[in-house]
Amino acid sequence: MIEFFYELDFGLDKEEYYIHWLNRVLVSEGFVLGDLNYIFCDDTYLLEINKKYLYHDTFTDIITFDYTESNVLNGDIFISIERVRENAGKFKKDFDNELLRVMSHGILHLMDYNDKTQEEVLVMREKEEEKIKMFHVEQL
């Protein structure tokens, strides 16, 4: 089951479009859906998680907690809407497109894609773009 939680004044329009898209992303990578939670929050909320669980005292746009077993995808993905908005401006991208990038980034991490090396970053960016394009394919 895919669920969305909001810890700030924000909400996805037409959540069913995002659920449909995320299910197609899972299938495209050979995964089966378990429990996937997206928690949308602000910088302060995510900073506290970053400090408490990862021991980093820095802002970030996303933190992913992976509970995936074999090909059954399970996880919690925390996204700072403030960071997404700021990064959209910084990279001269549309907010909705940047949100899709971050959402796909999180699910790709749950699928064992990493971004520690330059080579991994290139693969991650290609996969993000591939998954974003899947969102724009006819919905429902």
Image: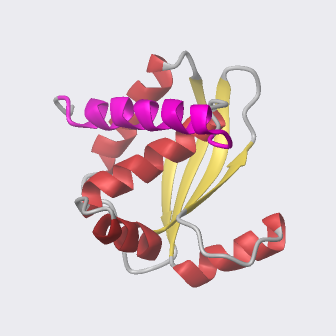
Residue 108 is left or right of residue 13, and the answer is right
Furthest toward the top, the residue is 30
- Quarter of the image that includes the C terminus: top left
Q: Residue at x 68, y 43 (%)?
A: 116
In the depicted view, which residue is nearer to us: 29 or 15? 29
Residue 54 is left or right of residue 40, and the answer is right
In the depicted view, which residue is nearer to us: 68 or 91? 91
Residue 122, relative to residue 81: is it above or below? above
Q: Which residues are magenta?
A: 115-137
In the depicted view, which residue is nearer to us: 31 or 86? 86
Furthest toward the left, the residue is 138
Residue 35 belongs to the span the image colors magenta: no
Scheme of colours in the image? secondary structure
> Can residue 120 be seen in this snapshot?
yes
Q: Residue at x 50, y 51 (%)?
A: 3
Q: Residue at x 46, y 79 (%)?
A: 8
- Image position, residue 25 (x, y; %): 43, 28
Residue 128 belongs to the span the image colors magenta: yes
Furthest toward the front, the residue is 118
- Image position, residue 16 (x, y; %): 31, 44
- Image position, residue 29 (x, y; %): 51, 19
Number of residue marks: 0
Residue 15, relative to residue 60: is it above or below? above
Furthest toward the bottom, the residue is 44
**Occupied quadrant, residue 13:** bottom left
- Quarter of the image that includes the N terminus: top right
- Image position, residue 96 (x, y; %): 27, 57
> Can residue 34 be seen in this snapshot?
no
Residue 104, relative to residue 38: is it above or below? above
Magenta segment, prevailing SS (helix, strand or loop): helix
Q: Residue at x 60, y 75 (%)?
A: 59
